[in-house]
């Protein structure tokens, strides 16, 4: 029998977090042995590749079984019950090791592997590894923050990206968001580098540019997600005749997916602090609304991504060099029948040998990319030339 650690199955599709986090009391984590079977179609006689994919399939099913015993009935929804083809959402599940019990061809086209996996698991909620798993499944998107800020005593908003005439920019809100999200595994675009590389046009000279203007600018910085917001701190005056001032911070923000133009989540928060110095109190109020907004917005973003990962995502696939409509029909049929996780392929347009398809798939763009390039589809091969979080561009070749 063959015994291997998880990294031996080293497939690009495996993005489940493997961090072993021991309990605070030093007790070893519980591990369960689970029997699971996986299968894969053998294409062009490639048994070795089919074997690897069958092992991958069996390990995913083992983890799915483990998660099924971990979640309570009142927290299970359709998205929680389903593991995406590649990750477990909101979990710290991982396969420590596995042993192959049996393997072989079931017929000329199917390879099957039965294995015994040792699966250890931790809390499902508020779990750092679960957050990282979702982020990895989304290819670790980078964030750009574009939050204008107006503290007590300032006549107008201060912002870094345009023609703000104010040199005092405390960045309280953006710093609060960064400090909250970095420990969660979120990465950010360096805005100083962005300012040096890209020219800001007139459309971005104000504190509240449009989403289309932001999308064009922020997309050039290398960010996939931009957080747009406006924060204001106001002095409500002395508290009951004392020298202490009541300072209120207000923040409205939204997260925009630059790839699709979709809003991932919005927040509107308010916090009150007391301070003898209104400006210092304003900074504290802005920091507090930044921290509160960061927690609420991240929860909404992750929930949105989790539903995509656990369910069906729509990927725009642009295929060039398609000779005719007949070839396109064969390609669409082959993708639906042969590519793992694909639920449906919808043709959006076809002209000048270029087809735009919408592929409904369980999994990630990266998973779809690997599958498309690995197989001969309708007598053709697809050579992927570019990808983003929700799009693929490929050339059709004989």
Image (tube, rainbow, N blue to C red):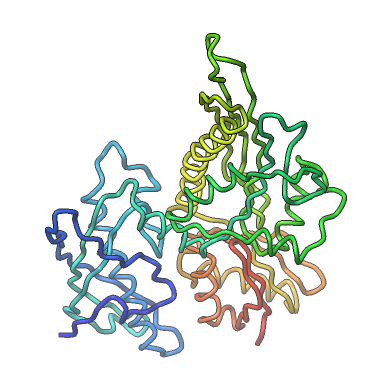
Residue drawn 41% across and 59% down? Answer: 132
User: Would residue 29 be found to the left or right of residue 180 on screen?
Assistant: left
Residue drawn 51% across and 63% down? Answer: 140
Q: Position of residue 397 (x, y in %)?
A: 66, 85
Q: Position of residue 220 (x, y in %)?
A: 73, 63
In depth, the one of 221 and 237 nearer the eye is 237
How many numbered marks have been drawn onto this rendered protein structure?
A: 0
Residue 276: name its quadrant. top right
Toward the top, the furthest residue is 240
Residue drawn 50% across and 75% down? Answer: 371
Residue drawn 40% across and 63% down? Answer: 85
Q: Quadrant of the C terminus?
A: bottom right
Q: Position of residue 200 (x, y in %)?
A: 82, 56
Residue 360: name its quadrant. bottom right
Q: Position of residue 357 (x, y in %)?
A: 66, 63
In depth, the one of 102 and 305 nearer the eye is 305
Residue 64 vertical placement versus 1 (above, below): above
In depth, the one of 213 and 309 nearer the eye is 213
User: Would residue 131 be found to the left or right of residue 378 on screen?
Assistant: left
In depth, the one of 296 and 77 nearer the eye is 296
Q: Quadrant of the N terminus?
A: bottom left
Toward the right, the furthest residue is 202
């Amino acid at each position: 029998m063959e015994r291997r650690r998880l990294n031996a199955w080293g497939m690009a599709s495996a993005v489940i977090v493997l961090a072993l986090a021991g309990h605070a009391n030093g007790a070893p984590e519980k591990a369960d042995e689970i029997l699971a079977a996986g299968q894969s179609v053998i294409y062009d006689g490639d048994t070795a590749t089919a074997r690897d994919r069958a092992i991958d399939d069996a390990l995913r099913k083992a983890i799915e079984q483990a998660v099924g015993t971990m979640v309570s009935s009142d927290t299970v929804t359709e998205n929680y019950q389903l593991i995406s083809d590649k990750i477990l959402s909101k979990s710290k599940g991982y396969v420590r090791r596995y042993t192959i019990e049996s393997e072989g061809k079931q017929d000329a086209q199917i390879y099957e592997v039965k294995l015994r996996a040792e699966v250890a698991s931790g809390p499902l909620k508020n779990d750092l590894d679960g957050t990282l798993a979702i982020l990895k499944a989304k290819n670790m998107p980078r964030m750009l923050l574009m939050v204008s800020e107006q503290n007590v005593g300032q006549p107008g908003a201060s912002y870094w990206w345009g023609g703000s005439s104010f040199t005092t920019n405390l960045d309280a809100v953006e710093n609060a968001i960064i400090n909250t999200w970095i420990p969660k595994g979120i990465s950010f675009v360096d805005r100083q580098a962005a300012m040096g590389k890209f020219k800001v046009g007139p459309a971005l000279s104000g504190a509240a540019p449009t989403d289309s203007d932001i999308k064009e600018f922020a997309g050039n910085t290398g960010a996939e997600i931009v957080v747009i917001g406006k924060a204001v701190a106001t002095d409500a005056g002395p508290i009951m005749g004392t020298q202490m001032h009541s300072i209120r911070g207000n923040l409205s923000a939204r997260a925009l997916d630059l790839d699709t133009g979709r809003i991932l989540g919005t927040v509107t928060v308010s916090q009150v602090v007391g301070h003898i110095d209104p400006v210092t109190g304003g900074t504290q109020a802005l920091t507090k609304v930044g921290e509160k907004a960061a927690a609420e917005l991240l929860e909404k973003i992750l929930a949105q991504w989790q539903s995509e990962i656990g369910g069906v995502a729509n990927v725009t696939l642009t295929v060039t060099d398609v000779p005719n409509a007949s070839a396109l029909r064969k390609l669409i049929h082959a993708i639906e029948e042969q590519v793992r996780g694909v639920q449906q392929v919808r043709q959006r347009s076809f002209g000048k040998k270029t087809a735009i398809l919408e592929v409904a798939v369980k999994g990630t763009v990266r998973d779809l990319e690997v599958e498309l390039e690995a197989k001969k589809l309708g007598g053709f091969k697809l050579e992927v030339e570019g990808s983003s979080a929700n799009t693929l561009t490929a050339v059709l070749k004989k």
